Image (cartoon, rainbow, N blue to C red):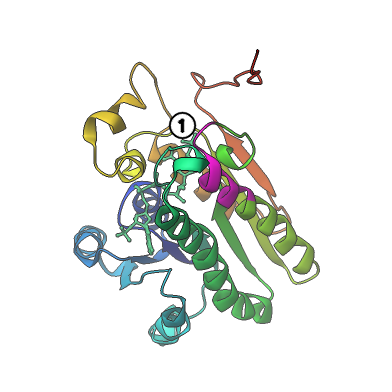
Amino acid sequence: MIVLITGASSGFGEAMARRFVQGGHRVIAAARRSDKLAALAAELGAALLPITLDVTQTDTIPAALAALPAEWQAIDVLINNAGLALGTAPAQQASLLDWDTMISTNNRGLVHMTHAVLPGMVARRSGLVMNLGSVAGSYAYPGGNVYGASKAFVDHFTLNLRADLAGTGVRATNIAPGLCGGTEFSQVRYKWDEAAAAKVYQGTQPLTAQDIAETAYWIATLPSHININNIELMPVCQSFAGMAITRE
Ligand code: NDP
Ligand code: 8X3
């Protein structure tokens, strides 16, 4: 298989790139930090093709895909993993710039990538689009505001993809992880305040990027008549809070 992974320079994307190459597949690894991708390419060899791509620069996406070498053009699996949370401030205090960046990356970038890759999949009558949602897309929490909403969009966009792709042989899956450590997610969210980022995982055994990579690999290698619509994973240490009630 040829697997295109966005956000392959760290965290889930990097772990998934390793997993798919280890499984004998070829990976197109996309992200903004070309130095990180070059290091991954040096480690994984010719099975990994690094491409520098900012998914928020949506005008550049079709040209970046058209520029792929001919033998890398027929993408079997698109993993829309590039994404981020910025901040945990309540909506009334949050940064609009942060909100725009989350929407541009988690939603706009994701739909543009999908739009660029889908026609080839439909023409070949096979393919899989795997989107990285989050538990934040299903369960509201204070400070989740636009991040959670952007992931709810990913969840529902994936289901609507399934509706449109009926009869084409192309599959679509939303992967919704909960607390997951060992990636740059919290460093990015807390703008590289390392203490704040570390506190998120204190006293927990979170999911790992490897757990998510194994999940993605399992989904992508299922027989072609099976579609996982939505899969939600949490570490055992994570559960549900009650409804918040304001009392007079
Ligand atoms: P990381 O911060 O480790 O990885 C995010 C990746 O996205 C990086 O490779 C980054 O690369 C890339 N990226 C960010 N912005 C862009 C952009 N504009 N264009 C291209 N690539 C971009 O986080 P995770 O691996 O933890 O997260 C991966 C996905 O999983 C995200 O969508 C996140 O929301 C989701 N998720 C994470 C959870 C967690 O707890 N960790 C739980 C649930 C979901 P670069 O900076 O080089 O561009
Ligand atoms: C990341 C999981 O709980 O930090 O999507 O929102 S959470």
* Residue 157 x %, y %: 67, 59
Residue 21 seen from this side: yes
Q: Residue drawn at (39%, 53%), measured in percent from left and top?
A: 13
Toward the top, the furthest residue is 248
Find out whether residue 37 is within the magenta segment: no
* Residue 246 x %, y %: 64, 18
Q: Residue drawn at (39%, 65%), measured in percent from left and top?
A: 27
Find out whether residue 151 is within the magenta segment: yes
Residue 1 seen from this side: no
Check mark 1 vs ligand 1: CB closer than 8 Å? yes or no: yes
Between 41 and 158, the one lying in front of the other is: 158
* Residue 14 x %, y %: 34, 52
Q: Residue drawn at (56%, 75%), measured in percent from left and top?
A: 117
Using the image, determine if residue 223 lies above or below residue 182: below
* Residue 227 x %, y %: 70, 53
Residue annotated with mark 1: 179
Left-right relation of 166 to 158? right
Residues rendered magenta in the picture: 142-152
Q: Secondary structure at mark 1?
A: loop
Q: Residue drawn at (43%, 37%), measured in percent from left and top?
A: 88
Q: Quadrant of the C terminus?
A: top right
Left-right relation of 122 to 188? right
Amino acid found under the numbered disc labelled 1: Leu
